[in-house]
Amino acid sequence: MTRWRRSLAVYADRRVLLILPLGFASGLPLLLTFSTLSAWLATAGVSRSAIGAFALVGTPYALKFVWSPLIDRLPPPLPLGRRRGWGITIQIALVAATLGLGTCDPKSDLVLMGALALLVAFLSASQDIVIDAWRVEILTPEQQGPGAGMIQTGYRIAMLVSGAGALMIAARAGWFAAYATMAALLMSGMLVFLCGPEPAAPAEPAHRVRSRGWDALRDWLATAVSGPFADFMLRPRWPAILVFVLGYKLGEAMAGVMAMPLYISLGFSLGQIAAVSKLVGFFATILGALAGGVVAARLGIVRALILCGVLQSAGNLFYVLQAVGGHRLDYLALCVAAENVTGAMAGAALIAYLSSLCSPSFTATQYALLSSLAAVGRTLVASSGGVLADKLGWVPFFLFTTVATLPALLLLVWIARQHATQPDRQLQLPVSTES
């Protein structure tokens, strides 16, 4: 118990605590361009087809790896350090874009609203690139697990604030007041970059020769674009690692996509589902994220991945309990709690693992690529969940999702055993200098 208490005490470390407001700043803009914006458009009488088209403004989140090399290698507009300079620059622009979006009138400025919403999403995705890189570089390897728990916790709190919180403000004071409040809250991330430390930039090779003109552009592209890939492929068994990243959360994603159809088919009202999901799911996710960080700090990242992966798979069995038990609110609460606790634990372990795979020279680019890879895998395979559920039925389908992650876990065990005689290259984080 003393060792577990020491692992829990990592959350009191100043640098780990700084991750919480950054996670909050990272999660706050998402719903402002998604469900909260949809609610605003719907109350203004905008057509459903136009509201649906606004979903396209979320595209930058899936493509952020495209411009991550620029943030990784180019000097920031503000000379405050590689990460702090870019972070503060992007956040200033994000606050301004959010305020601009709040001043629009959906009845007369719909095209402008679309452009500003796209800009907010682009700046938010760019902010995520900087925040993830700063988090990976500022924390020690032992702190990556708790850091992952903190980033998820802040993100979840922000989604509650920018979702239900923004709607409550809009109902009382109007939409501009809601978006202006969210813009003010975004400054929490700016304060962290202003007051927090700046990670030391990796040293450039001493033998590197400075070139000019097209040669300089070619050298820069080789370093910024192909460099992250070449560096990652130096890791032993890197193809197996990528397959593992693709498959780790597939079972959870497939089950999650069909959770709502299951609840509705059992006769639960939307109000019942929303109440249980908001109340139970919110606290269960925070508990799971923090617990996953502690497990990673105590057991190490690989063992935490295995344990949390097993728990994540077992969590899908509660869907089976729900399907067999039928319309019971206590089962619904138990199912939502189990789904969110185990999923968040596995998510924290996976974030810590992805962080450990990044080289200090290409942190922003490599993390953006790896996280996008994990998201693409979940999205592509989870989209087949409806077809399988129709063919198999609820109970066999959720039993299938319980074992769907097993190949990825077995692959991880194989990778760990292969590296037992030749340990994995650990992430050598640069020594940080206080600002």
Image (cartoon, rainbow, N blue to C red):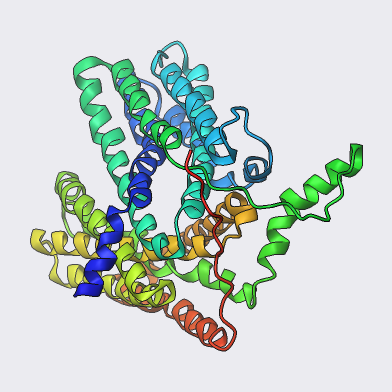
- Residue placed furthest toward the front: 434
* Residue 159 can be seen, yes or no: yes
In the image, residue 140 lies at what x, y percent? 45, 60
- Residue placed furthest toward the top: 108
Identified at 44% across, 75% down, the residue is: 302
Quadrant of the frame with the N terminus: bottom left
Q: Quadrant of residue 170?
A: top left
In the image, residue 99 lies at what x, y percent? 41, 18
Identified at 14% across, 48% down, the residue is: 272
The image shows residue 7, relative to residue 102, as above or below, that is: below
Identified at 64% across, 77% down, the residue is: 236
Residue sitting nearer the eye, 290 or 423? 423
In the image, residue 197 lies at what x, y percent? 46, 42
Q: How many marks?
A: 0
In the image, residue 387 lies at what x, y percent? 43, 65
Residue sitting nearer the eye, 358 or 311? 358
Identified at 56% across, 55% down, the residue is: 430
* Residue 118 can be seen, yes or no: no
